[in-house]
Image (spheres, rainbow, N blue to C red):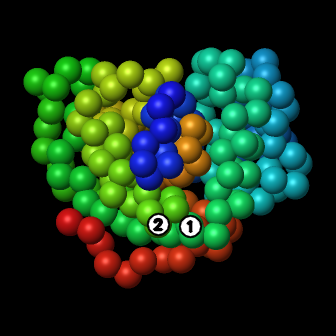
Amino acid sequence: MTERRDGMKRTWLVQRLQRPRSFGQLKDNPFSFGGGYKNGGLTDDAMALLRPIMSFDYMGAAEFEFGAVPKAFEAMAKRKDLAAWSFSVKKANRGWQKKDAQKCDATVYALAPIDWQEEVESRVREWAVDQTVRMKERTQLGSALLPEKEWDRDVCGWLELDNGFMFFTDEDMWSKTAELFDAVVLDEMAA
């Protein structure tokens, strides 16, 4: 992975997030992190903070199961320049091919270091339109922005693991996460 001038690396791993879920007496889906570490390596204390805000989608690859999630959260927690803002996505792709692209006007909510704002927006807009961008697993962002089936709405948050930033289609998840990380909320919506 090559590093850019803004300090960001190429994105390879993006953990999909869902709204909090209850599995009867189980607090978490035991299959979220496959056969890897318990809670993907997150401590019980960390899970207690995150559980009311989000749950983790099963990604189907070991790269997500053995500590990448807590490393990304730790990197974010160490930053003193985290900002929370929203921006508009004007076009999304629900299918695998660009020819299937459909128009939407959706708001995406981001949480990242302030100096990454432009690049985060650029990457998210690209992932909304082109689901063939080379990454380990699909983001399913296009489906979340242009839901065709009820389950397309299940994924509504994302944790980028290579750099440590997040984005959401669910405003409540975003605001609670921004509060958890003590991020500065920016007032203006970028066009």
What number of labels is visible? 2
Identify the residue at image location x=79%, y=50%.
Answer: 47
Compared with 163, 80 (above or below) is below
Query: Is 54 on the left or on the right of 136, as rendered?
Result: right
Q: Nearer the viewer, residue 169 or 134?
A: 134
Q: Position of residue 105 (x, y in %)?
A: 19, 55
Identify the residue at image location x=69%, y=34%.
Answer: 68
Q: Could you say which quadrant of the image residue 135 lies in?
A: top left
Q: Could you say which quadrant of the image residue 153 lies in?
A: top left
Would you say residue 149 is visible in this rendering?
yes
- Image disc number at residue 82: 1
The alpha-carbon separation of the residues under discs 2 and 1 comes to 6 Å
Q: Earlier in the sequence, mark 2 or mark 1?
A: 1
Q: Nearer the viewer, residue 69 or 148?
A: 69
Compared with 115, 42 (above or below) is above
Local secondary structure at mark 2? helix
Question: Mark 1 and mark 2 in contact (Cβ < 8 Å)?
Answer: yes
Q: For the residue marked with disc 1, what is the amino acid?
A: Leu
Q: Position of residue 35 (x, y in %)?
A: 78, 18
Identify the residue at image location x=56%, y=67%.
Answer: 82
Identify the residue at image location x=44%, y=63%.
Answer: 115
Give the farthest residue toward the bottom. Answer: 187
Q: For the residue marked with disc 2, what is the amino acid?
A: Ile
Local secondary structure at mark 1? strand
Compared with 153, 140 (above or below) is above
Query: Is 107 on the left or on the right of 191, as rendered?
Result: right
Would you say residue 111 is visible in this rendering?
no
Mark 2, other Cα within 10 Å: few <14 / some 14–19 / many ≥20: some
Mark 1, other Cα within 10 Å: few <14 / some 14–19 / many ≥20: many
User: Which residue is disc 2 drawn over?
Assistant: 114
Q: Position of residue 103 (x, y in %)?
A: 13, 44
Quarter containing the C terminus: bottom left
